[in-house]
Structures are given as C-alpha cells and as structure tokens.
C-alpha cells in the first residue's frame, strides 16, 4: 500500500508570492494535493468559488464549524478562514502530500492535531521587496496593504515555531527547495517503521537460514 501522504503547511507574509510557488510546485510534480479553504472574505477579481476558495457567508461558515467540517479555522484581517477536513484526510490516505496555505494561528493548531506536519515559512529576500510586491499586486486598497503589513509584523514573531524557512527570491529555486524538503520527510525513520521492521524480520530469517 502507498505510504500515507505528508501534511505540509506553507505560510508566509502576505504578498511574498507563496501562491505562485505552490502553483508551480503542483504543476511540476504529481504527488501534491492543494487543499482549498473556506473563507468569509469576498472573492477578488478573477477568483472563483471552489477554485481559490469556497466563498461562504458568516452563517454558512459557522455551520461548518458546528458540524465539525473544519480541521482548524482562524480569523485573519476580520475574515474567517478554515481548512475542510474531508478532502485533506482522503488525499493523505490516498498517498498524496497535502499542502495547506494557511496563516500562523491555523498552522499551530494543525501541528497540535497532526504533530508530524511539516511547517514551512516563505520569506521575502528583504522587507523592501515585500512592500513593493504588495503595492504592485494592485488588488488591495492602501488601508488593506497597511493592515496586511501590520499583520506580517505580528506573524514574524511566530516564525520560530516553523521547521524551515524558504526564501522566495528566485521562483524556480524556491520551488525546487520546497519539493526537496518535502521529499526528505518521506525518509524520516518515524514514517518508515513498518518497512524497517519488514526488512529486519527478513534479514533475521536469512541469517537463521529459514528462507
Ligand atoms: P488571502 O485573503 O490573502 O487569500 O489570505 C489571507 C490569509 O489567510 C493568508 O495568510 C492565507 O494563508 C490564510 N488562509 C487561507 N486559508 C486558510 C485556512 O484555511 N486557515 C487559516 N488558518 N488560514 C488560511
């Protein structure tokens, strides 16, 4: 049977380009499934329900929480965001490495529930580059950009809880590095105990001349 997939949380400052990194990752390699979150925020231009997010009203979101449909949820810049449980568990059981692009509160809650989760934080090469990218995106008002930079400051306090940082300077390099970090997790001893035991048992049998 295929090894169960790994749960990977990718966080990063708003505007750092983590969406682009993940899009490339999923296009390039076929072992990934990207979870689609539910949110109460309004769709941005070009976003579609069921593709970027499941866009829900506050009442609908509340119902998802009460029905236990979300693994975690958090409030970010006055909107709610949450990770649907069913998709994540089905994909991991099927051997896919599931990527959650979520903010820090959610990341820490996921780590509590699934301690083997790999937590990755995408950093800009510099603070000035981050501000420039946010301004260039042009989808947000100056007030929203300010709120996101403020939130970025708060989030930078929590980076110590993550396993690795990745610097998104050169996109290709960042994608390759992310893939290689995730692949390394498949080789962790704790994830391979049944394979190790199988080999150990057979070697023992060989040594006794039983097979
Ligand atoms: P945006 O509105 O820019 O799409 O996302 C705002 C923030 O919410 C980002 O940091 C994004 O990673 C985070 N986010 C997206 N989906 C989820 C989720 O399901 N749970 C949590 N906790 N955060 C999420």
Image (cartoon, helix red, strand yellow):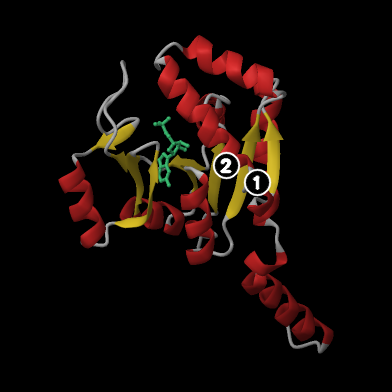
Q: What residue is shown at x 71% (from left), y 82% (from top)?
A: 201
Count of numbered labels shown in the rendering? 2
Q: What residue is shown at x 31% (from left), y 30% (from top)?
A: 51
Secondary structure type for disc 1: helix
How packed mark 1 is, by other alpha carbons closer than 10 Å (few <14, some 14-19, many 20 or more), is: some
**x then y, percent, for residue 151:** 51, 36
- Nearest to the observer: residue 48 or residue 140: 140
Image quarter in which the C terminus is found: bottom right
**x then y, percent, for residue 174:** 68, 29
Callouts 1 and 2 close, C-beta under 8 Å: yes
Q: Quadrant of residue 154?
A: top right
- Nearest to the observer: residue 163 or residue 103: 103
How packed mark 2 is, by other alpha carbons closer than 10 Å (few <14, some 14-19, many 20 or more), is: some
Identify whether 130 is placed above or below 189: above
Please name the residue that numbered disc 2 is placed on.
155
The answer for how far apart the CA atoms under marks 1 and 2 are is: 7 Å
- Nearest to the observer: residue 89 or residue 153: 153
**x then y, percent, for residue 12:** 57, 36
Please name the residue that numbered disc 1 is placed on.
159
Identify whether 138 is placed above or below 70: above
């Amino acid at each position: 049977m295929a090894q169960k997939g790994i749960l990977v949380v990718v966080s990063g400052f708003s505007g750092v380009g983590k969406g682009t990194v993940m899009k490339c990752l999923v296009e390039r390699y076929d072992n990934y499934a990207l979870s689609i979150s539910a949110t109460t925020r309004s769709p941005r231009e070009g976003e579609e329900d069921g593709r970027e997010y499941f866009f829900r009203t506050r009442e609908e979101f509340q119902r998802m929480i009460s029905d236990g449909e979300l693994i975690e949820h958090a409030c970010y810049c006055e909107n709610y965001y949450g990770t649907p449980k069913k998709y994540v568990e089905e994909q991991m059981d099927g051997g896919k490495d599931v990527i959650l692009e979520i903010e820090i509160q959610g990341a820490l809650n996921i780590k509590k529930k699934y301690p083997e989760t790999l937590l990755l934080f995408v950093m800009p090469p510099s603070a000035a580059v981050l501000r420039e990218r946010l301004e260039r995106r042009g989808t947000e008002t100056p007030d929203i950009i300010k709120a996101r930079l403020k939130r970025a400051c708060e989030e930078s306090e929590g980076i110590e809880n993550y396993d690795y940082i990745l610097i998104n300077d050169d996109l290709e390099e960042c994608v390759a590095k992310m893939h290689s970090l995730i692949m390394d997790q498949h080789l962790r001893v704790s994830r391979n105990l049944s394979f190790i035991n199988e080999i150990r048992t057979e070697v023992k049998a060989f040594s006794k001349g039983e097979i």
